C-alpha cells in the first residue's frame, strides 16, 4: 500500500483497502477509534464494482476537499468478498486535463459529475467543486444542469448573456462523469464550421480517454 503513494500521480495518496471484517489499511491516514469503513459510501459502492469504477464526487475526510473515488471489490479465488480497494482522484488532476482542450478561439471544456451536479474539472478555479445549481443563471456552466437532469447528451445551444454557445455533452462509460465541450456560435460560422465541429467532437472524446 505504501508503495502506491506518489504525489505526481492522479492518485497521490495511493490505494487503500477496507476488509470485510472492518480492518482499514491506508498508508497516509490512521482513523480514529470506532471508524468503520464498511459504513462509508465508497465501500458500499465498491461492493457493486467487479472492476475499478468511478463513483460520485464527495467531501474527503482527510483533505477536506472534493474528490472522486475509484473503487472495486476484492474477492477470493472462490468468489467470496474480501473487501474493497479504493483510490481518490484529486480534482486538480482532472482540471489539468480538461484545461488542455482548446476549441476555436475561446471555447474549451469542463467535466461534471452527473450524479451530484458538481463541477469536477475546469480551468476556472472559482467554480471548482461547486454544484451547477449553486451557480448564477448567467454562468457558462448553468445551462448544463437541465440537460443532465433530463439525461440529454449530444449537441445543445444556450444563450449566456448576449452570447449563444454550442455545447457538446459526452457521458463517460461506467461512471457518472460527463465531459462538456463549448464554443461560441459566432466561432462556428463560415467555411470552418465542419472542421471546428469535428474538433469539438474530438475534444470531448479526448477528454474522456485522458481521464480514463
Image (cartoon, rainbow, N blue to C red):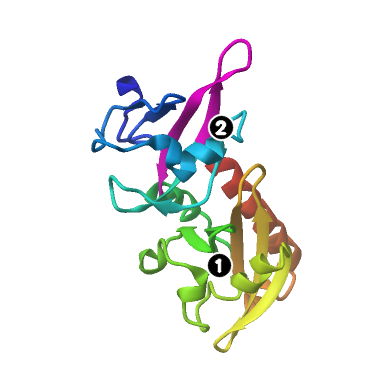
Q: Which mark is residue 203?
A: none
Give the residue pinned by disc 1: 107
Q: Residue furthest bottom?
A: 162
**Residue 61 position in % (x across, y down):** 31, 48
Q: Secondary structure at mark 2?
A: loop
The C terminus lies in quadrant: top right
Q: Residue at x 72, y 57 (%)?
A: 198
Determine whether 40 is above or below 77 in the image: below
Question: Any magenta on residue 73?
Answer: yes
Label 1 vs label 2, nearer the camera = 2
Mark 2 is surrounded, within 10 Å at the Cα level, by few (under 14), some (14 to 19) or many (20 or more) other residues, namely some
Give the overall secondary structure of the magenta segment. Answer: strand
**Residue 68 position in % (x across, y down):** 46, 47
Q: Nearer the viewer, residue 157 or 176?
A: 176
Question: Any magenta on residue 80?
Answer: yes
> Residue 14's image quarter?
top left
Q: Residue at x 51, y 74 (%)?
A: 133
**Residue 134 position in % (x across, y down):** 46, 75
Query: How far, Cα to Cα, is label 1 from label 2?
Result: 32 Å
> Residue 46's image quarter?
top right
**Residue 112 position in % (x across, y down):** 54, 59
Q: Secondary structure at mark 1?
A: loop
Mark 1 is surrounded, within 10 Å at the Cα level, by few (under 14), some (14 to 19) or many (20 or more) other residues, namely some
Sooner in the amino-acid sequence: mark 1 or mark 2 = 2
Where does the magenta region start and end?
71-90
Give the residue pinned by disc 2: 52
In this image, 67 relative to 107: left or right?
left
Disc 1 to disc 2: CB gap under 8 Å: no
Q: Residue at x 28, y 27 (%)?
A: 27
Q: Nearer the viewer, residue 142 or 18?
A: 18
Amino acid at each position: 500500500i505504501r508503495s502506491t503513494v506518489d504525489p505526481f500521480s492522479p492518485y497521490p495518496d495511493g490505494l487503500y483497502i477496507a476488509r470485510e471484517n472492518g480492518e482499514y489499511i491506508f498508508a497516509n491516514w490512521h482513523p480514529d477509534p470506532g471508524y468503520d469503513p464498511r459504513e462509508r459510501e465508497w465501500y458500499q459502492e465498491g461492493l457493486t464494482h467487479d472492476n475499478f469504477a468511478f463513483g460520485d464526487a464527495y467531501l474527503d475526510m482527510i483533505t477536506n476537499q472534493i474528490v472522486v473515488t475509484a473503487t472495486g471489490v476484492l474477492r477470493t479465488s472462490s468468489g467470496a468478498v474480501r473487501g474493497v480497494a479504493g483510490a481518490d482522484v484529486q480534482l486538480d488532476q482532472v482540471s489539468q486535463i480538461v484545461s488542455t482542450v482548446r476549441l476555436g478561439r475561446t471555447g474549451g471544456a469542463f467535466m461534471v459529475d452527473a450524479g451530484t451536479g458538481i463541477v469536477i474539472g475546469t480551468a476556472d478555479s472559482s467554480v471548482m467543486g461547486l454544484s451547477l445549481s449553486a451557480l448564477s443563471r448567467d454562468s457558462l456552466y448553468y445551462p448544463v444542469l437541465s440537460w443532465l437532469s433530463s439525461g440529454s447528451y449530444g449537441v445543445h445551444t444556450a444563450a449566456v448573456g448576449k452570447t449563444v454557445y454550442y455545447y457538446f455533452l459526452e457521458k463517460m462509460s461506467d461512471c457518472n462523469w460527463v465531459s462538456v465541450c463549448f464554443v461560441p456560435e459566432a466561432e462556428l460560422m463560415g467555411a470552418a464550421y465542419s472542421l471546428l465541429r469535428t474538433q469539438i467532437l474530438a475534444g470531448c472524446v479526448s477528454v474522456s480517454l485522458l481521464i480514463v
